Image (cartoon, helix red, strand yellow):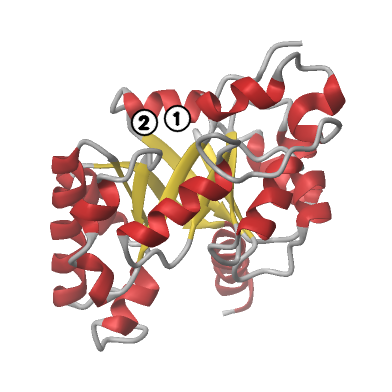
Amino acid sequence: MDLPKNEFKAALKAGKQQIGLWVSIANAGSAEAIATCGLDWVMVDTEHTPNDPAQVQAMLQAMAPYPTHAGVRPGWNDAVEIKRLMDVGAQTILVPYVQSAAEARAAVAAVMYPPLGIRGVSGLSRAGRYGAIPNYTATANAEICLLVQVETKASLDEIEAIAAVEGVDGIFIGPADLAASLGYPGQLGHPEVKATILDAIHRIKATGKAAGILSADRAFLHEAMAAGATFTAVGLDIGVLLAGVKALVKEWKE
């Protein structure tokens, strides 16, 4: 059995736009349904959801037959948590709240096997197809995609240093936390927040690394893509669900 190719990582390296969706509903059936819709990628969130590694594994298994690539966001830049999520099959990891090059290096170490990192070895995990992939430990690093999240005012000054860390494939701008850090909590549409995000995307692109964003503001997403965002999350599963239900309620009750 061959090591699965990380097509998402290859697309980012080639500068191809990848359209994605945040997956926060902790349900394998819901995740599978989303995976049938033609998205390039989804991000299974564990930072702000009740998802644990067992639930993530079920979701990854449900999405596996479909061409949509599934990444996972751990709750923190924690090597033990990241190891568990990778052992259940995640090849793309988005590490939140990375503030410096040192923290980016810690994230790289967490996702990579030695000698490049400290990821613990398990020969019979789902990641290695339960031992069916020959030399998995020696080859896995090549297909790991590491994305780090910049989401505070302080971390904006560190973008170039973070991007320079070998093993970082892309930088995601966390708009909600960044807005709060800039003094505009809940105001993702504030002109200063938008301008700061677009400037950050330009700077990330200039480093040669992929830039990412999540927003439900369609007009702003077009601006972000024009600025250089290449992994673009166009919504959140629960947000899409609620918008659809509210539209039905408005049509049939109001």
Residue 24 on image: x %, y %: 63, 61
Q: Residue furthest front?
A: 115
At 73% from the left and 51% from the top, the residue drawn is: 84
Q: Residue furthest top?
A: 1
Helix, strand or loop status at disc 2: helix
Residue 145 on image: x %, y %: 49, 36
Residue 134 higher or lower than 43, as above or below = above
Residue 215 appearing in the image: no
Residue 202 on image: x %, y %: 14, 49
Residue 164 higher or lower than 75, as above or below = above
At 14% from the left and 51% from the top, the residue drawn is: 203
Horizontal relation, residue 57 to residue 182: left or right: right
Helix, strand or loop status at disc 1: helix
Q: What is the crowding at mark 2: few (fewer than 14 residues within 10 Å), some, or many (at least 20)? A: some
- Amino acid type shown at disc 1: Lys
Observer-nearest of 41 and 201? 201
Q: What is the crowding at mark 1: few (fewer than 14 residues within 10 Å), some, or many (at least 20)? A: many
C-alpha distance separating marks 2 and 1: 5 Å
The answer to the question of whether label 2 and label 1 lie on touching residues, with beta carbons closer than 8 A, is yes
At 33% from the left and 32% from the top, the residue drawn is: 17
- Amino acid type shown at disc 2: Leu
The residue indicated by pointer 2 is 12
Residue 60 appearing in the image: yes
Mark count: 2
At 52% from the left and 38% from the top, the residue drawn is: 41
Observer-nearest of 196 and 105? 105
Residue 173 higher or lower than 208, as above or below = below
Residue 241 higher or lower than 115, as above or below = below
Which quadrant of the rendered structure holds the N terminus?
top right
The residue indicated by pointer 1 is 9
